[in-house]
Amino acid sequence: MTQTFAVTLTIPDNEAFTAFETLARLGIPVARVVRADIWQFEVDASAGDLAGTISSIETIHNPNKHRLAARESDRPIPGEVWVATRDEAPATLVGGRAIPGVRGVRRRTAWRLLDDSGRDVAPHELDRAIETFLCNPAFQVAITA
Amino acid sequence: MLVFPGTNSEDETLRAVRAVGLEGELVHWSQPEKLARFDAYILPGGFAYEDRIRAGAVAAHDAVMDSVIEAAQAGKYVLGICNGAQILAEAGLVPGTGPLRRPTAAFAPNASGRFQSVHVHVKLAVDPSRVPILAGIEPGAVIPAWASHGDGRLAAPDDELARIERDGHLAFVYCDRDGTTVAAPNGSALSCAGLVNAEGNVLAIMPHPERDAWTFQHLDATRDAVRGNTEEMLAPSGGIVFFEAFARAVLAEAIA
């Protein structure tokens, strides 16, 4: 079974802002970029309260600056792209320690591009952002809804 | 010597360049208007834009790179070291087999998943007569350097790796001190330590030859043998050969 979590910053996200500046320079009609780290855990029944465990480790989620949210799907939501390393082998440790019931962990970076009315940019603009900047196909893959 | 926010090897690289008889100057990313008058360009190591999004990706799209790309296409010499190599790959200048800024290869995160700093040797893997930027380096010459990166693993689809090897884009490979090719410490495909474009005027090398340009920087018994002898400690080391070749190329072009 896969459990998916999104970790977002509650403080200003400099990386998202840098992405916004570059995408704007490339002519993508974007007003705001939202970024999240997606963590996907392959778990068995003994995993228990995984969100609680992740919070207590504080390696991928620091409550002083992050928000941790469980995702219902193990796929991106509409308007979102996940960028992952091609052929990535799942890690077995989080913060240098094993989590009971977790067999493997994968990390992706999620991007949403919003226009000046707060809506997702058109799909072809997201595709253009992926092809020109967000994903290097030499070693990465882009996963969309 | 192009300096982006986060570049950190510009001073030692400039020192190596000046030691081999070239005149050099630091030019910041916000000063593209200064670039045109130079004969050659170096993108030194560091972490441009904190490696945000991907190592080299943001800098490759920086406005100042428009000038560097234009210069490269005009045949001027462009050298990228470490982060500079990552930027050249993201800009599509090396291996240079696809459209600009549509990378066909990458210096991707190390196989270990960690930043690694290790003394290495690299050897020329391309016919130097085809690569003007390496003019005068003996075929198979072994150059010491420091590999110091988290993203130095050449990664590309299999057909692109075959093209890199077949068409002479593999400029340097990792080797031992005797010149025998070894597995790359970062897991790089083809044991690749450096890439060059088809025209031979744009070169990307991941390890830092400028960090083994003087004996005091060299990880070898030689260093201990001369410890305490300031003159010998400050004598050129093997990495300077790389910059001497670069200088020969730049000066020959400038005179021509």
Image (cartoon, rainbow, N blue to C red):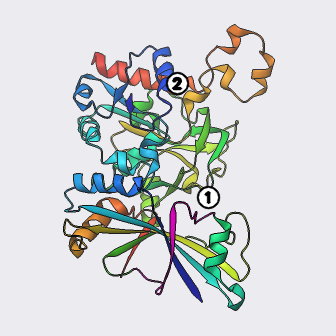
Residue drawn at the location 57% of the way across and 65% of the way down? A63
Residue at x-position 51% and y-position 60%: A65
Q: Would you say the residues marked 2 and 1 are in contact, meaning their CB atoms lie under 8 Å apart?
A: no
| Picture coordinates of residue B160, whole percent (x, y) | 42, 61
- Where the C terminus of chain B falls, by quadrant? top left
Magenta-tinted stretch: A59-76
Residue B38 location, quadrant:
top left
Where residue B43 sits in the image (x, y, percent)?
41, 35
Does B117 appear in magenta?
A: no
**Between marks 2 and 1, how big is the CA–CA gap?**
27 Å
Total labels drawn: 2
Asked which secondary structure carries label 2, the reply is helix
**Residue B202 to residue A23: above or below:** above
Q: Which mark is residue B113?
A: 1
B215 lies above or below A133: above
Q: Which of the 4 image quadrants contains residue A121?
A: bottom left
Residue nearest the observer in this picture, A91 or A21: A21
Comparing A93 with A60, the one in front is A60
Q: Who comes first in sequence, dot 2 or dot 1? A: 2
Disc 1 is placed on an element classified as loop
The location of residue B94, given as percent across then percent down, is 38, 47
Identified by mark 1, the residue type is Gly
In the image, A139 versus A40, the foreground residue is A40
